[in-house]
Amino acid sequence: MIEKYQLKHMVKYLCEIAGVSRSGYYNYFSAKSQEQRKRKNEKDEEIKEIILKAFHFKRRKKGARQIKMTLAGQFNVVYNLKRIRRIMKKYGIICPIRKANPYKRMMKATQEHRVAPNLLNRQFKQDVPGKVLLTDITYLFYGKGQKAYLSTIKDASTNEIVAYNVSDRLTIDLATDTLKKLKKNRNFKKAKDALIHSDQGFHYTHPNFQKSVKSLGLRQSMSRRGNCWDNAPQESFFGHFKDEAYIKPCSTLDELKREIKQYMTYYNRYRYQWNLKKMTPVQYRDHLSKTA
């Protein structure tokens, strides 16, 4: 058996190697310290369960900031980000990591297609709902290799998705029907000198789309060729959408459309956003309307 003095010297030697004091070593294994760690772990378990409620709220996984805002907005619970991140790390609660958007430009415009100037010039946030609209198209893979396309129109000031359209065909109707849905949206109020901004894709240079834009009383603006930053907020939305929506498990187009409809409701009404003063897009739209 190891003699007491041998054990003492062994502990001293190991503490020196580990860079800790002997008093700290003995204190760590004291009954008081063990009881404190037990109480801390029990408290962390309680906090973890509360955080998981926010993490899974509306069946959408969230990062630390989203969790903080959801806790405050939906559960009346306030935790700081440091605590939330510590608990997430401790219990392996993984937030979604956005992937690069693989959407590519569709095709070169023909001679009858016209490119509009970049009127927006990245002035996305103008604090006026209905003033700056962003539109784009992305593709979605679901089920067993099926492919669909999502067209959206986003209010740049509020981040609200004010119109969207889903189709299994990449035709001009995908974009023009999105404009029709914008017109039918009773919650959308067009501001003075409103414009709609897009890339130079085939749909947006098409005469039918440009005619529909004019009929809505909107000006048309386009990004510079090959410059994704000119429509960055719209691209950002697609990144969040693909991380958070349950697209792959859908087996039919109708099922995909239902999931997208549920996500759009969640995004507009329940997904708190840090740069919207921790409000949802609908809450922020109402806030801007009241302060106008």
Image: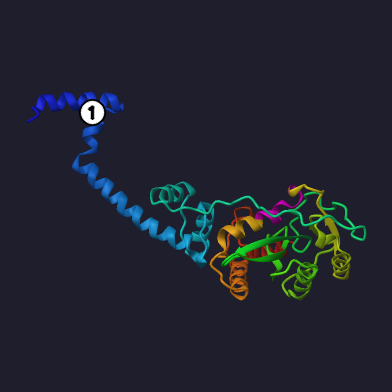
Can residue 195 be seen at all in this image of the molecule? no
Q: Residue at x 84, y 56 (%)?
A: 221
Q: Residue at x 11, y 24 (%)?
A: 5
Can residue 63 be seen at all in this image of the molecule? yes
Quadrant in the picture for residue 194: bottom right
Q: Residue at x 52, y 67 (%)?
A: 58
For label 1, the residue is 22
Q: Which residues are magenta?
A: 229-236
**Residue 213 in the image: x percent, y percent?**
85, 66
Task: Please tell me whether residue 235 belongs to the stretch shown in magenta.
Answer: yes
Main secondary structure of the magenta stretch: helix
Which residue is at the front of the view, 218 or 190?
Answer: 218
Most extreme residue toward the front, as rendered?
145
Q: Residue at x 56, y 71 (%)?
A: 251
- Name the amino acid, label 1: Arg
With respect to residue 246, does 30 lie above or below? Answer: above
Q: Is residue 48 left or right of residue 288?
A: left
Q: Quadrant of the C terminus?
A: bottom right
Mark 1, other Cα within 10 Å: few <14 / some 14–19 / many ≥20: some
Most extreme residue toward the right, as rendered?
112
**Residue 267 in the image: x percent, y percent?**
61, 64
**Residue 164 in the image: x percent, y percent?**
70, 68
Q: Is residue 42 left or right of residue 65?
A: left
Q: Secondary structure at mark 1?
A: helix
Q: Is residue 153 left or right of residue 33?
A: right
Q: Is residue 180 left or right of residue 240?
A: right
Which residue is at the front of the view, 276 or 244?
Answer: 244
